[in-house]
Image: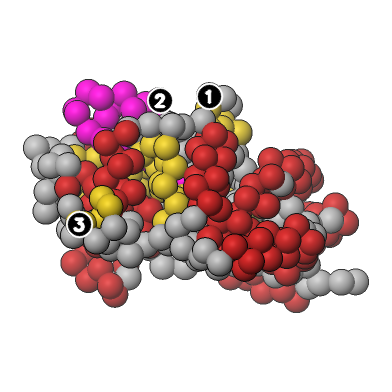
Amino acid sequence: MKNVSFLDLRAINLRYLKQLTTAFERVLKSGRYILGEEVNIFEKEFANYCCVKYCIGVGNGLDALTLIFLAYKELGLMKDNDEVIVPANTYIATILAITRSGLKPVLVEPDIRTYNIDPGEIEAKINSRTRAILAVHLYGQPAQMSVINRIGKKFGLKVIEDAAQAHGALFNGKKCGGLGDAAGFSFYPSKNLGALGDAGAVTTNNQKLAECILSLRNYGCCSKYINIYKGLNSRLDEVQASLLRVNLKHLDQDNKARSSIADYLLRNIKNSSIVLPYVLKNVVPVWHLFVVRAKNRDKLQSFLKKNGIETLIHYPVAPHQQKAYREWKGCSFPITENIHKHALSLPISPVMSLESAVRIAKVTNRFC
Ligand SMILES: *Cc1c(COP(=O)(O)O)cnc(C)c1O
């Protein structure tokens, strides 16, 4: 039997070999490789997809989130050492965006069922320095944005989404990326919407913020050689934008394919030592990852490997236990630590066959 790989990026992209090649050729022949038509059009198409007014293409997902904070600082709404509330179990890039911007991350435990920030734990962490809540739609399931927005409003905080794993996911019927004040997306190749290299975007309905980020991504220019901010270079390039336009056309269909695999696994994995993903009623997740929990996680991983099924761990070390963030040494986040110790991501992708899903369920059910 053929092994089940975790994610076959080659197969994913080769489905559209012709369209991707045509897009690349168009850019090659245009002679314009930075900030041209492709970026312009992709920004319009992705804003449209997310049902927001503005999309700004940038270099990657980390920069997208960082640029949101830098723009709020330029607009005088945040300053050094202001605090940003963020889930403790997120991917490290979420936290890096806050510290890179000179702000202070304040970690909050997640809800063990959904792995997203526990809205009930937020208020206790708010003080006079708090400026924002950075909600993460982890593994492709939207965070509880209506409660989070209500808290944001009550305390005058910005609500920002880390939507890097949630392209197309819905909360109360509304797309991620348009649920707060601004959102950061990553188009890293393995994301639900991926480029063939690094790429990212910010989405927002706030015109001032959009204009500021548009300038900051390009040295802080307002027009050629005229600088109004100390910006950076984080532009989405024309080749990646042209390829993203191809992949965006297939995003909904790809998310549907992921969803049917997820449905199959949810219905057919029946093993009392394994906790399956939990989906809230008011969301439609996009299954960036299919994460289960097992007491004996490492044993489950080697059992699956022995049976030809490749899995990964998202993530093995919690941010507060990373060497890079020594300042949190000794801090305790038991729910977060529990997740990092027990979580295992089973394979899921838009090109995975039902046959592979059947095999995953069968093998997983045999684990004890
Ligand atoms: C991938 C990811 C990022 C960072 O995106 P890059 O494009 O790799 O910089 C940020 N947050 C989350 C939750 C991610 O999954």
Instruction: Please tell me whether mark 3 sits on a helix, a strand or a loop.
Output: strand
Query: x%, y% of residue 280?
Result: 56, 31
Instruction: Please tell me whether mark 1 sits on a helix, a strand or a loop.
Output: loop
Q: In whole angstroms, how far apart are the C-alphas of marks 2 and 3?
A: 38 Å
Question: Which residue position is annotated with label 3?
Answer: 227
Quarter where residue 298 is shown: bottom right
Asked if one can make out residue 218 in the rendered structure from this viewpoint, the answer is: yes
Circle 3 residues within 10 Å: few <14, some 14–19, many ≥20: some
Q: Out of 75 and 306, give the one closest to the viewer.
A: 75
Residues shaded magenta: 142-163
Asked which colour scheme the image uses, the reply is secondary structure
Residue 330 position (above or below residue 263): below
Say which residue appears at 90% left-offset and 71% top-offset: 1
Q: In whole angstroms, how far apart are the C-alphas of marks 2 and 1?
A: 9 Å
Asked if one can make out residue 296 in the rendered structure from this viewpoint, the answer is: no
Question: Which residue position is annotated with label 2?
Answer: 146
Q: Please report contact status of discs 2 and 1: CB closer than 8 Å, yes or no.
A: yes
| Front tag of 2 and 3 | 3
- Taking the image as shown, residue 273 lies to the left or right of residue 261, namely left
Q: Amino acid at mark 2?
A: Ser
